Amino acid sequence: MPSTQTQIAGFSFDNCLMNAAGVACMSIAELEEVKNSAAGSFVTKTATLEPRAGNPEPRYRNVPLGSINSMGLPNHGIDYYLDYLLDLQNREPNRTFFLSLVGMSPSETHTLLRKVEESGFSGLTELNLSCPNVPGKPQIAYDFETTEKILGDAFAYFSKPLGIKLPPYFDIVHFDQAAAIFNKFPLKFVNCVNSIGNGLYVEDEAVIIRPKNGFGGIGGEYIKPTALANVHAFCQRLNPSIQIIGTGGVLTGRDVFEHILCGASMVQVGTTLHKEGVPAFTRITEELKAIMAEKGYEALDDFRGKLKYLD
């Protein structure tokens, strides 16, 4: 039977699938459910320094080809997730998990990272540079000058494995410019992509979520081509030491296969996980293994990054 085992930053995972930050990760109960599923790991809800209630409801809706949300970073605060992860390290020392975080300002981001640096956390930290759903706040990763400064300041003191969650880029020159910045730093991974920001979904004559007059991040089937483009663009441009986590539009094993073909080392499931629950991990993994077996692939490395082009 083909293996879906993978590695990120030297850490091994039995399966390449995990949840996307924002789905099945708000509470310890949800994280435990993902941990005990077929997923190879989990990532926590993106944590801020203090707990946040987030935007008013309704702020998430399933739609026919995906979802729209404007959550506003609801979370229980960094200490909630960090304390849980430290306890989990004692209970399951042979497994590795991801802690997602972002500050509401650059100074708060550094406060969070210093807290992780000074803690006993030995997993992977994801700095979320893509938070499109906080009213009045721009996405950090679209401001290249700010992104470079935050990363430069962070790596002056942060010595643990660090990666970044990115919004989608849409212009070739932006892939070039972003990769040139990321290649300056000892990042372990980039996560492509967060939802496509500021979409609008209409039913009858009204929007369907309350925050921002209905504007929200689009996920699901709508975004797979954009996600694959970002995964492959960075696969072509980043130093080999910076791995890629693919996120966006994963409904089936075929979708995971395409993310890996484009260069991803792990693949996250968001909207589908929200709709189906953790059994989705088992179904998608079985579908992926069936495709690998049909094509004669025994491991992900057999086809990772080997996307073919037309002559």
Image (spheres, rainbow, N blue to C red):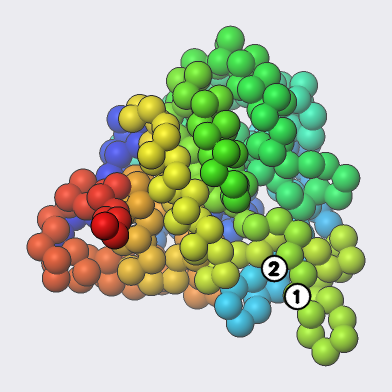
Q: Can see residue 32?
A: no
Q: In whole angstroms, how far apart are the C-alphas of marks 2 and 1?
A: 7 Å
| Residue 151 visible in the current orientation | yes
Q: Earlier in the sequence, mark 2 or mark 1?
A: 2
**Looking at the rendering, in which quadrant would you find the C terminus?**
bottom left
Q: Position of residue 37 (x, y in %)?
A: 38, 61
Q: Secondary structure at mark 1?
A: loop
Query: Which type of secondary structure does the marked residue at label 2 adopt?
Result: strand
Residue that badge 1 annotates: 201
Q: In the visual, does 20 lie left or right of 259? A: right
Residue 150 location, quadrant: top right
Of the numbered discs in the image, which one, if any, rests on residue 311?
A: none
Name the foreground residue: 229 vs 72.
Answer: 229
Q: Is residue 293 above or below residue 93?
A: below
Q: Amino acid at mark 2?
A: Ile
Image coordinates for residue 244, horizontal then vertical, percent: 41, 41
Which residue is at 71% across, 45% downward?
Answer: 131
Q: Choose between 275 and 51: the one closer to the eye.
A: 275
Residue that badge 2 annotates: 68
Task: Report the amino acid beneath label 1.
Answer: Tyr
> Viewed as shown, does residue 307 lie left or right of 27?
left
Tag nearer the camera, 2 or 1: 1
